């Protein structure tokens, strides 16, 4: 029995990998899906669905199609929902395409900045996982850190 399709690597261009992964799962890569994928792949920060729609510019993709595409990509694990800065959920490519990272979130303007890598050392993560497992009978499989504060632009520094 085969192990299934190989997971994409960070070095692999998501604009090539995601259509291939969708096809393997029985989904077509339509024009609107391609446009949303391109918008996600070319951004440096998580975006709301409305921001993704605006980024499509002249593309003839309606807002409902953007919502549906983002939902599909989240459902199949290729895009993840991130922090809801200023009450709006934002989306970015899943970790196989971006590498593990955390976010800095400005409480004033809502800007989200990637904080590359993980600040938690492996032994700290392992201890936290064991503690949660013992106290809550819950097995931790992933984690996310968010730091809230004031960005450089809003701080005026």
Image (cartoon, rainbow, N blue to C red):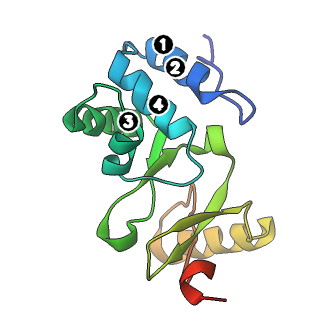
Q: Position of residue 68 (x, y in %)?
A: 26, 34
Q: Are marks 2 and 3 in contact (CB under 8 Å)?
A: no
Q: Are marks 1 and 2 in contact (CB under 8 Å)?
A: yes
**Real-space CA distance between mark 1 and mark 2, rounded to the nearest whole angstrom:** 5 Å
Q: Residues within 10 Å of mark 4 (few under 14, many from 20)?
A: many
Inter-mark Cα distance, 2 to 3: 26 Å
Residue visible at 31% across and 39% down in the picture: 71
Tell me the distance, in whole angstroms, between the alpha carbons under discs 4 and 3.
Answer: 14 Å
Quarter in which the C terminus is drawn:
bottom right
Q: Quadrant of the N terminus?
A: top right
Q: Earlier in the sequence, mark 4 or mark 1?
A: 1
Marked residue nearer the N-terminal end (2 or 4): 2
Q: Which mark is residue 57?
A: 3
Q: Is residue 27 visible?
A: yes
Q: In x, y percent, where is residue 40? A: 49, 39
Label 4: state its secondary structure: helix
Name the element at disc 2.
helix
Question: What residue would you read off at disc 1?
Answer: 24
Q: Name the secondary structure under disc 3.
A: loop
Give whichever of discs 2 and 3 has the lower sequence position: 2
Q: CA distance from mark 2 to mark 4?
A: 13 Å
Q: Earlier in the sequence, mark 4 or mark 3?
A: 4
Q: Nearer the viewer, residue 30 or 10?
A: 30
Name the residue tied to disc 2.
21
Residue beneath label 4, please?
37
């Amino acid at each position: 029995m085969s192990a299934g399709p190989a997971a994409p690597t960070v070095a692999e261009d998501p604009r090539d990998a995601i259509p291939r992964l969708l096809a393997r799962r029985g989904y077509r890569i339509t024009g609107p899906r391609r446009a949303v994928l391109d918008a996600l792949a070319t951004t440096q920060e998580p975006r709301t669905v409305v921001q993704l729609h605006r980024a499509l510019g002249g593309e003839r993709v309606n807002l409902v199609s953007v919502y549906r595409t983002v939902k599909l990509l989240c459902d199949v694990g290729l895009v993840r929902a991130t922090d809801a800065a200023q009450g709006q959920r934002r989306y970015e490519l899943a970790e196989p395409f971006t590498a593990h990272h955390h976010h800095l979130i400005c409480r004033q303007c809502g800007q989200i900045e990637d904080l590359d890598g993980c600040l938690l050392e492996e032994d700290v993560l392992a201890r936290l996982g064991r503690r949660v497992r013992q106290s809550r009978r819950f097995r931790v499989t992933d984690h996310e850190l968010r730091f809230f504060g004031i960005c450089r632009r809003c701080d005026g520094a």
